[in-house]
Image (cartoon, rainbow, N blue to C red):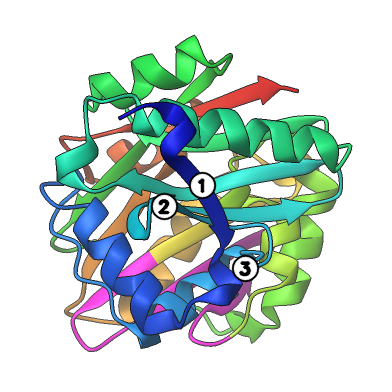
Amino acid sequence: MSTMDYSLKSVSEFSLAEAAALFTKAFTGYIGGHVDLNATALAGLIARDNVDLNASRIQLLGEEAVGLALIARQGWTSRVAGMGVIPEMQGKKAGRWLLENLQAEARARAEKVMVLEAFEQNTPAVALYQRMGFEIVRRLYGYNADRIDAQIVAPELHEIDVVEFGKRVVGEGAVDLPWQVSGANFLRSGFPAKAYQLGEAFAVVIPSAETLIVRGLVVSTGARKQGQAGRLVRSLAALYPARKWIVPQLCPEEYGGFFEQLGFERAPLNQVQMVCQL
């Protein structure tokens, strides 16, 4: 077998069920946990992460699908939203061939930057990305808490449009936030995410009967270090009692101390945010 035997097709040429099954197989034994994707879950991922199915690729060896890459696009930037090859092809440079072609196609689209996130503990993947020109920008941590000390729901706490939260992040958040928690991404978000404001603190959460996932948190520039974010979190704990709190591994390392001060525990795995100048 040589790399000449590989070819690429657009994910748009396959059904969601076929793509989801390949994604599941490619992520067998994934360090981030068990992956069992179906068409419905894949459709949700595509909508949430702004995945371009025409630019996303399925890698073929002859007629057999052996790899998959989901590509999200925005302006001059593209993101590898998910990439993997089936277990039988791992360690045979199939992933390198796929990534090389993704980069070449991004350059052909006149894109300037390619980004991704990877678990730092997945050392073979991180090493591959670094060999392919990606540099680590920062570490991204996740946090969990079984309970948060609540206060009464502050009367001025109110729900806002997630789009309004996105505008706040665009205007006052860091310019190099991870794709999934960037202002531009929140501008495209909606159900099941819910956004709240308390004073000059703003949050986006995804509530369920058992958990409360924190997707974003920002405080207006002139109101920082006044305890407003903590007050918002404790008020949300009263609004959503008896939930386990989850902060996905997308929190930039420079902001993680806030959650630790509230009693959150850092998740054992962390991601790295990586950027490649094309």
Can residue 60 be spotted in the picture?
yes
What residue does disc 2 label?
Answer: 60
Q: Position of residue 87 (x, y in %)?
A: 16, 44
Give me the residue at 41% from left, 52% from top.
60
Disc 3 secondary structure class? loop
Q: Is residue 265 left or right of residue 70?
A: left
Asked whether 76 or 218 is in front, the reply is 76
| Residue at 42%, 72% in the rendered image | 235
Magenta run includes residue 198: yes
Which of the two discs, 2 and 1, labels the residue nearer the N terminus? 1
Q: Which type of secondary structure does the marked residue at label 2 adopt?
A: strand
Question: Does 86 sit above or below residue 269?
Answer: below
Neighbourhood count class around disc 3 (C-alpha, 10 Å): few under 14, some 14–19, many 20 upward: some
Q: CA distance from mark 3 to mark 1?
A: 17 Å
Q: 18 or 40, which is in the foreground? A: 18
Please rate how many residues cluster around mark 1, counting C-alpha atoms within 10 Å: few if below 14, some from 14 to 19, many from 20. some
